[in-house]
Amino acid sequence: MTPALRKTHRIAWFSLAVLLPLAWLAAVLAVPDKLCQEPARAPQPAPLGSIVQSKQSENLLLNLRSDVEDSRYQLEILITKPLTSANAVVWCKQADQTNKQLGLLGAKGVYRFDLDSTATQTIEVTVTDELKKQQLAALKWDR
Amino acid sequence: MSLTYDPVHWTAHKKLYDRVLLGLIAGYLSVFFGLQAWLHPASTYETNIIRATGTLAFFLLHVTLCIGPLCRLNRRFLPLLYNRRHLGVSVFLIGLVHGVFNMVQFHSLSNANPFVSLFTSNTAYNAFAGFPFEALGFLALVILFLMAATSHDFWLHHLTPRIWKSLHMMVYAAYSMLVMHVMLGVIQLERSPVFVGLAGVGLFTVVGLHVAAALKQQKTDREAIREVAYPEVDAFVFACTVSEIPDNCARMLMIDGQNIALFKYQQKLSAVHNLCKHQNGPLSEGRIIDGCITCPWHGYQYLPGNGQSPPPFQEKLHTYDVLLHGERVYVHPKPHPEGTERPPAIIPDNLSSTNTAV
């Protein structure tokens, strides 16, 4: 190595000896406290104790679950076969007869929605394809 | 009689070097895949390959970069330097696998050209934490490709050592980019203190070794400088005393911009240009072996009396006049044309040195 090249190496490394550790430290400090990316599926609530009613359709199995005291209700949907509908919305009828959207169905798996079921005597849930305006499944239960 | 061209002059040392290197690579990949299967059984083959090749290439680059300064600090590491280019090419090839799998996994399954997607999927070029780290990795891979492609001596001869070395110094830019590729990429997602620590250890090791070697060499360079401002004997410049040079070894001198290696051998003193014709290796750090100056880097040899390589080789060095006054050795800074025979200075018997080479 020529003296000139050695000098260039020295300049380069004395510079990197300052810059690289600073950049490393800056990157460490920039690490976020929590991940920015959204998880693919939101965590599901734990299933309630007993199934009070079940309904099977072509792609879906709907289970209405309740706790031991019958004070809380939960809709559990199992997608048994991949949905052919691009859009599948889950609705629950309210006391004022309007439909409240509980959520969307997507990939195959289990979905659970806690129901606000204290007000109505009848629990009525439907799964619809809003694009094709079709009902995919429905479940009704009188308490 | 036939004439053939051998692109690689395989030696026993090269073969051993490559066998050890391939063994280490195979071992690392086996252990990595095994650990992945145990700790992350759900991860796919593509993900495992991306992780394995990425970490391996990064690790090997650190090893490659450490060899140079280690050799400066301790000559025992010199055998690692001889075929360092094999390590460098391996780093590029493993990095290439990592890059290709990343391109296929993340950028090839859309309507956009994968290379366009690479630079446009994340356009936060004005941010730090969210900076497109993939672009840094790609640019570093381009530099490593250029270095791997020109690693053969063919390019060294045709580009000249000066240009070739300047090109290969871009490894420092590539290293910086790869450090940031890791710190702004996987570290931001994994957030594990172990990975942060490992990256830090690697970085500080490489930087620390280079700074230590630079400081040591700076001291040696300063000691080698001889001022022409005070020439003593017919424009000859005092170099050192006879006893300061071990037998079959050399003293490096910087006189009037001339980098000179002053060798003592067989009761004689000769001076040649310090830089090997092959890759500018420091001849003064070499020895006289079988009557020839031997470069410590790759073993190129030159006759001390005329600076010529023994036949059939044709490399030649500049030679310099040497004068001995009592115990004091003087060197004339004006170089003779390459390969010029110059009579050595004869060391009288009463000055025979007991200072032998270690």
Image (spheres, rainbow, N blue to C red):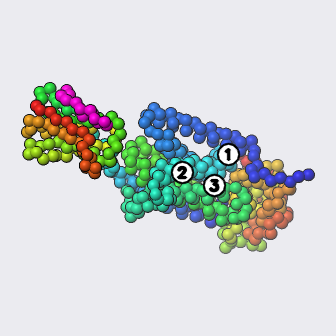
Labels in figure, total: 3
Residue B71 lies, in percent from the top left, at 63, 50
> Residue B21: which quarter of the image?
top right
Q: Are tags 3 and 2 found on a single chain?
A: yes
**Where does label 1 land, which residue?**
B79
Check residue A53 for magenta coloring. Answer: yes
Residue span colored magenta: A46-62
**Where does label 2 land, which residue?**
B100
- Mark 3 or mark 1: which comes first in sequence? 1
Query: Disc 1 versus disc 2: distance between alpha carbons?
Result: 33 Å
Mark 3 and mark 2 residues within 8 Å of each other at the beta carbon: no
Query: Disc 3 versus disc 1: distance between alpha carbons?
Result: 20 Å
**Which element is circle 3 on?**
helix
Judged by depth in the image, the label closer to the viewer, 3 or 1, is 3
Q: Amino acid at mark 2?
A: Val
Q: Amino acid at mark 1?
A: Pro
Judged by depth in the image, the label closer to the viewer, 3 or 2, is 2
> Residue B305: which quarter of the image?
bottom right
Residue B155 lies, in percent from the top left, at 70, 60
As drawn, A36 above or below B35 = below
Residue B275 lies, in percent from the top left, at 71, 61
Q: Are tags 3 and 1 found on a single chain?
A: yes
Q: Residues within 10 Å of mark 1 (few under 14, many from 20)?
A: some
Q: Residue at x 52, y 48 (%)?
A: B101
> Residue B233: which quarter of the image?
bottom right
**Where does label 3 land, which residue?**
B148
